[in-house]
Image: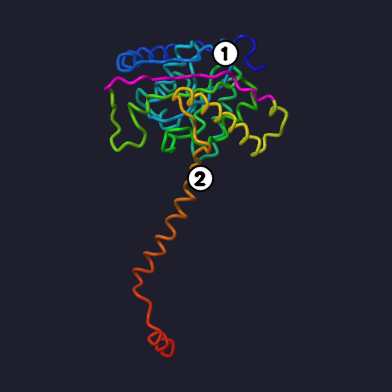
Amino acid sequence: MPGSDGKRRKVGFWYRLAAFLAKPPLILLFKRDWRGMEHMPGEGGFITVVNHNSYLDPLSYAHYQYNTGRVPRFLAKVGLFKGGFVGAVMRGTGQIPVYRESTDAIGAFRAAVEAIEKGECVAFYPEGTLTRDPQMWPMTGKTGAARVALLTRAPVIPVAQWGANLAMPPYAKEKKLRLFPRKTLTVQAGPPLDLSAYYDQEPTAEVLREVTDVMMDAVTEQLAAIRGEPAPAERYDMRKAAVRRRQQRAPREGAEHHEHAGPAPAPAEAAEGEKNA
């Protein structure tokens, strides 16, 4: 099994520097409720799949993961790696750049596989963006994490988090922190997923979708435990939602078109128009 030789990544200077800068304000401004750390492998490479509901939650999850002693490598958009202090930290901590809308995007998956085979933790946000679900439940996921999981056969740990979205709600008109009353950042990891039934199957689009659904079901289950309420029966799907919006707009746009075109001609007027045409 990959990483079974006891390899694990050292924390290193850049991660220690990032923790030195980020942890004090996180500890001062937020309460913490860390759960399920015992599910993180002590050695060897592994994958975490995490929900995403706030611009702040990567810090919340990274704080949690750092405290387990297994620092994560994130897949992040390439723009974050360009110049400045943030770029230096991203490069120094070994994060993995993703070139969206490019054939180079597959390179991120190769880099993730290599990192796992070296005994590292690679963190995926399978949703690919902040959730659009109105109640902040996880959306349908993209299949990149499933692809890497089947290639490496590494442990996959589902992680859910809640609280960062209360301090910095996604898509709010003003991206500002709501610090008071003091929020609790809850992060909960579940046991490794059993994906062995898929290991010897051809990684078709259907199989990758099934594995992704298994991952998102597990993340949603952890979040339901945190929130103390059941998740919706159907997961929010951005593509289906976009189709519904287009279908809803079509009748309105048609009605507006007829309204601007003016009233239909009376039968006699229409007949006169036909004769003169």
Is 47 inside the magenta-drawn segment?
Answer: no
Drawn side of residue 85 relative to residue 208, left or right: left
x then y, percent, for residue 276: 41, 90
- Is residue 193 located in the magenta-colored stretch of the structure? yes
Task: Answer with mark 1 or mark 2, whichever residue precedes in sequence.
Answer: 1
Residues rendered magenta in the picture: 180-196
Along the line of sight, the residue nearer the viewer: 56 or 263: 263
| Real-space Cα separation, disc 1 to disc 2, in angstroms | 35 Å
The one nearer the camera, 256 or 10, is 256
Q: Is residue 199 left or right of residue 221?
A: right
Q: Report x, y in % for residue 164.
A: 37, 25
Q: Identify the image quadrant of residue 262.
A: bottom left
Element at badge 2?
Answer: helix
Task: Work out which quarter of the rendered image holds the N terminus and state it.
Answer: top right
- Residue tagged by mark 1? 41
Q: Which mark is residue 239?
A: 2
Q: Give the camera-side residue of 87 and 64.
A: 64
Q: Identify the mark at residue 65; answer none if there is no mark.
A: none
User: Going by the picture, which residue comes out furthest to the right?
Assistant: 200
The chosen color scheme is rainbow
Q: In this rendering, would 21 be left or right of 148? A: left
Residue 181 relative to residue 158: left or right: left
The kind of residue on which mark 2 rests is Arg
Q: Which of the image's four quarters has the C terminus?
A: bottom left
